[in-house]
Image: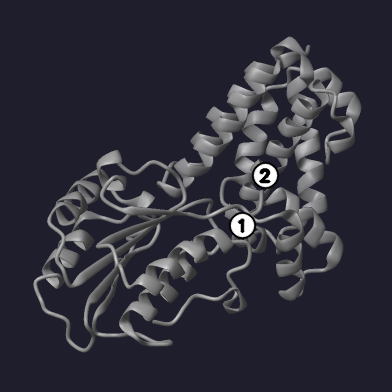
Amino acid sequence: MNKLKLSEGFKGQERALILINQVLDKNEIAHAYLFLGPGGVGKNEVALAFARILLGIKKGSHPDLLVLERQGNTIRIAEVRRLKEWLNYKPYAAKRRVALVPEAHLMSTEAANALLKVLEEPAGEVVLILTADTETLPPTVVSRCQVVRFQALPEKEVCEILLQHGVEREKALQLSWLSKGSPGRALSMAAVDLSALIELAATFWRDIIQGDTLAVYETAENLEKDVDRREAFLAVLEVYIRDTILYAKGLIAQMQLLPVELAQKTSVVGVRELGRLLRLIGKTRHSFSRNANPLLAQIKLYFEIADAMKEVY
């Protein structure tokens, strides 16, 4: 069989490609795979390339390839039912059939339960390939898949990818550390006016550490309808919190964005509480992908941050 190569554009995923290529070399194809890792690091692209190798094609569609689709931000049970019906047929042109479930973490509970039944009774001529950004799939689903883990990319590699897409260098450098190693996230934020966004975040941060909770509502309304600016804003807040943790640990030289005098003030919150806030931002981001109300979800998050900052003022 052919192999997946780094030259095909899968930078930073050497370990995942080694594992997949070992499977191809031995021709020991499992009935189900789960490509698990951060969003925007190439999982879906690798999954499609893997599927095409399994089917013996280089590009384009194929009658023995099925890709499940989302309705809004959810993969509904109707799509899994479509998959189950599709599985009743024998391969049309290849030795096997391959079904892709991109962003499987967006499956509804009903869809996940229905997919579990498919995984419990694997057909010999079918390979399922799931991708997921977060470890929110039911353990019973995960346990029936061979897990291939994908990693966040080093900042240097993210920056190089952005430069290749025409992003100017200074902005590429900023996006490379704001995106936490995700080229996909970085590219989605490339059109955002980062200077204005960072200024907005600085104003919000100063307001909440002074006890001005009106900033919570104003900021949430400002970002309610702009997905990319909202994502960039959350990324800046994550950097602020990480910078505060670095300050608290005496690693001031590694801080990226937050002024030292502000980090000094907010460090009284404590590393454990700051870590909790980082996890809350991640959960809020995930809730957006599940169709959460962007205004209410933001207000809830920003009030959590503001409440944690009460010790500062």
The quadrant of the image that shows the C terminus is top right
Tell me the SS state at disc 1: helix
Reading the image, the residue beneath label 1 is: 185
Which residue shows up at 31% across the image and 82% down it?
55
Q: Nearer the viewer, residue 263 or 295?
A: 263
Reading the image, the residue beneath label 2 is: 235
Q: What percent of the width, then of the height, locates residue 288? A: 48, 45
The quadrant of the image that shows the N terminus is bottom left
- Asked whether, in this view, residue 178 is left or right of residue 148, the answer is right
Which residue shows up at 45% across the image and 66% down it?
44
Q: Quadrant of residue 60?
A: bottom left
Q: How is the image coloured?
A: one colour
Counting residues from the start of the chain, the first of labels 1 and 2 encountered is 1
**Identity, as a three-letter code, of the amino acid under mark 2:** Ala
- Asked whether, in this view, residue 29 is left or right of residue 8, the answer is left
Q: Which residue is farthest front? A: 26
Vertical position of residue 46 compared to residue 150: above or below:
below
Query: Is the Cβ of the residue at disc 1 closer than 8 Å to that at disc 2?
Result: yes
Q: What percent of the width, then of the height, locates residue 241? A: 72, 31
- Asked whether, in this view, residue 88 is left or right of residue 52, the answer is left
